[in-house]
Every structure is written in C-alpha cells, then in structure tokens.
C-alpha cells in the first residue's frame, strides 16, 4: 500500500502488543507496541512504513504519535503493571529534540501514567550514527525517568564502548537472523560479552525473535533475563494474562537445567580423569628431568586427551617448549614457545591463584585456539606453588565425548 493511502486511512491503523516474559518469575513483564493496518485480508504489519527513510518524516512522526496514543490509552484504561515498549526512529527523535515524544508522555502522566513503566526503544545502529555528536541529548532524554532499550544489539558486531557510555536499561538481542537454528561461535562470543557488560552496567539482557526451542535455550544459556518471540506468544490486539506462559517456560527451563547438569558432570568427569592420570605421571618424573623431558612423559601418558602441552611459572612465563602433535599425530617439541608470557590471557592469573589455593586442576571453558582456529578447552594443573602444567584438548576429542561442547 502507498504511504499516502495509509495516512488517508489512519483510523484503520491500530496497535498490537507483543509480550515480553521474564525468566525469574515466568510472567509477562512488558509489551512491545507494533503497528498493524486493518484490511479485508486481516491485520497487516506496518513495520516497513517506519523503517523506510524515503517516507516523509512528517508521515512517520504523525503515525508514530497516533499509535503511541492508542496504546497508552489502552495501557492506562486496563491498569497495566508491566512495561510498555515504544519504538522510535532516532533521527526523528533528534529532529525535534524529543519534543513530540516527551509532550505525549507528559500528557499521559497527568492521567496517571508512571513514566518508569515506559521503555523508549532505539536501534543500536541508529544511536551509534548520532550518539557522539549528540551525547548530551541522549543523557537529557534519559533524565525524564522512563527506561531506555537499545534494540538489534550485536547484529553487526557490537559497539561495547557506546553501550557502556549510554548505559541503557535494557539491551535487546535478536536471535531470529540465526539461520537453521545454528548459532555461529562469533555470535556466542559477542553475546557472552554483552551478558558480562550488561551485568556490569546494571542493564537487563532481552532476547527477541525467539521462534523455536533451541533459540530459547540459547537465550537462557547466554544470560537473558527477558524473552520475546512467537515461540512464547504472538503479538495480539489486546493485553494477555501475565501467567499465560508460565507452565511452558517452567517445563522448558527444566529441560535446560537437566542438560546443563549433564554437561557439568561430563566436565567434572574429564577433570577427575586428567587429575588422576597426572598424579600417576608425576610419580615417574625425576627431579633431574628437564621441563621438556617432563612434558614429553606427560604427552605419552595423556596422548588421547591433548594435542599441545607446556609448562608456565606463576608469572605466566613459559618454561618449557611446546609438546605438539604434528600432521602424523606424533609428538614433537617446538622450542619457539619457551619464555613467552601468557599472563595477558583472560582468567590466566585468576586460575593460577585458584590452583595455588585449592591445590587442584581446572578445565577452561570453550574458546577458539588462534593457531588451529578450532574450539578447544585447556586443562591446567599445579605441579608446585610456582609451576603449572597446561594441556590443550582438541575439538575432535571434545566432540566425541557427550557434554563437552
């Protein structure tokens, strides 16, 4: 339909509400307002109308205001206790310094609206385009008391510095674009970083576009507190019962927890196996053995587990060569690694301290090895208070064992 036709039939444009659910209580915590056009073939989405920059700003501002007022009327009339998410184009918000949006909310505030229930939703890419030239405006707009959500975060990488400065209340991550229910490791790493950042700045992580079980599981595993998507509930012209999805979410969470417990058990089992093996191997090592002789004996005894073995001191300096498997699957010593420092690696020093205090080995999380470009884990083991053994475990081994990936 032509944009002008839509403006001529504005009375047929109505708000739909897509519920957002919380992980902690499994209740509706808010609704995102979406525009729908009533037609003879059913209600049609108008998302394209607001995203098309070729449509005059005046049209989009007018229709935005129309939709928001209808939604706010219904929100107040039904005495909702949840959040109401209102999408806005950042360029339109800046066009009149937020005057249209703020005046609309102030009018409803006089009717009993609590501004802390309103969430202004802006797209990350749009904010990134304008933020550095308009910092004070974005801080000013946040001073009114409503919440700020940053949408489509992590879709094209992520502006972590921008997020840290803006400090949005909610960070929205879309999982719908991940095809065939597969989640490339790149996305997982970005989302784990977002999870850590959101915790540090006090923001809530919201995963949207959830259309299947795997996407909900992924969202749960990556620190999502809020969830949104057709798998849980489709947009509707009315508000719904807050607990309508509680039973389903509780059942899904139970599946997730059982699976994660199995993974943890597998990791504990591998840790124990390696610990027992290394205790036996250390009994065969003489005080006169060099570090390279030591790792050669470890390599022979731990052949099925590792592809690279080396020794570091408590300050991160490598004391041995690298014992590595070559293309023929034979162990060779590579002198180049000796005296390199690895203390810059995340968690390296923390794990050294933990090994010294707890006197036991640790299995790392999954990460990508730079040289091999494959997902691996590293097992670290305390030899003395100042000497530590590291075994890099290849993807092929992890893949063959249940629960290690």
Image (tube, rainbow, N blue to C red):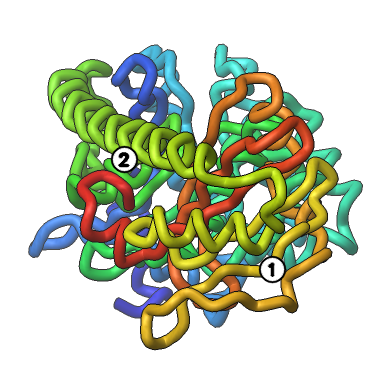
Q: Between residue 99 and residue 16, name the one nearer to us.
A: 16
Residue designated by label 1: 321
* Residue 87 x, y percent position in the rendering: 52, 49
Q: Residue at x 20, y 21 (%)?
A: 250
Q: Is residue 142 above or below residue 3?
A: above
Q: Residue at x 21, y 47 (%)?
A: 402
Residue furthest to the left: 41
Label 1 packing within 10 angstroms: few (<14), some (14-19), many (20+): many
| Tag count | 2
Residue 283 visible, this orientation: yes
CA separation, marks 2 and 1?
58 Å
Q: Between residue 231 and residue 359, name the one nearer to us.
A: 359
* Residue 238 x, y percent position in the rendering: 24, 31
Label 1: element kind: loop
Image mark for residue 18: 2
Q: Residue at x 77, y 58 (%)?
A: 319
Give the mark nearest the N terminus, 2 or 1: 2
* Residue 148 x, y percent position in the rendering: 64, 38
* Residue 12 x, y percent position in the rendering: 28, 54
Q: Is residue 183 left or right of residue 51?
A: left
Q: Residue at x 47, y 31 (%)?
A: 84
């Amino acid at each position: 339909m032509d944009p002008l036709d839509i403006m001529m039939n504005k009375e047929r444009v109505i708000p739909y509400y897509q519920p957002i659910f919380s992980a902690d209580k499994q209740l509706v915590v808010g609704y995102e307002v979406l525009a729908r056009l009533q037609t003879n073939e059913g209600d049609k989405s108008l998302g394209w109308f607001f995203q098309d920059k070729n449509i005059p700003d005046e049209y989009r501002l007018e229709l935005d205001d129309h939709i928001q007022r209808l939604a706010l009327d219904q929100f107040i009339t039904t005495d909702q206790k949840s959040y109401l998410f209102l999408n806005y184009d950042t360029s339109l918000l800046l066009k009149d310094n937020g005057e249209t949006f703020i005046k609309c909310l102030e009018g409803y505030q006089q009717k009993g609206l609590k501004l802390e229930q309103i969430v202004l939703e802006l797209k990350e890419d749009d904010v990134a385009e304008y933020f550095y030239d308009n910092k004070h405006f974005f801080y000013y707009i946040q001073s009114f008391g409503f919440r700020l959500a940053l949408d489509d975060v992590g879709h094209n990488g992520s502006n972590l510095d921008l997020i840290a400065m803006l400090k949005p209340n909610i960070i929205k991550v879309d999982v719908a674009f991940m095809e065939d229910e597969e989640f490339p490791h790149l996305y997982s790493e970005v989302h784990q970083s977002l999870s850590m950042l959101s915790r540090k700045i006090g923001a809530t992580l919201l995963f949207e576009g959830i259309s299947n079980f795997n996407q909900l599981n992924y969202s749960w595993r990556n620190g999502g507190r809020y969830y949104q998507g057709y798998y849980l509930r489709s947009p509707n012209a009315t508000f719904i019962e807050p607990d309508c999805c509680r039973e389903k979410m509780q059942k899904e969470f139970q599946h997730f927890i059982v699976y994660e417990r199995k993974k943890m058990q597998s990791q504990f089992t591998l840790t124990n196996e390696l610990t027992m093996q290394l205790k036996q191997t250390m009994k065969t090592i003489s005080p006169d053995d060099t570090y390279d002789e030591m790792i050669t004996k470890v390599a022979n005894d731990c052949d099925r587990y590792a592809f690279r073995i080396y020794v570091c001191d408590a300050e991160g300096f490598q004391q041995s060569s690298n014992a590595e498997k070559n293309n023929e699957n034979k162990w060779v010593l590579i002198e180049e690694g000796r005296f390199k420092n690895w203390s810059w690696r995340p968690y390296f020093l923390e794990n050294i301290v933990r090994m010294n205090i707890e006197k036991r080995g640790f299995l790392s999380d999954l990460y990508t090895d730079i040289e091999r470009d494959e997902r691996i884990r590293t097992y670290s083991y305390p030899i003395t208070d100042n000497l530590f053994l590291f075994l890099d475990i290849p993807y092929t081994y992890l893949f063959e064992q249940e629960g290690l990936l």
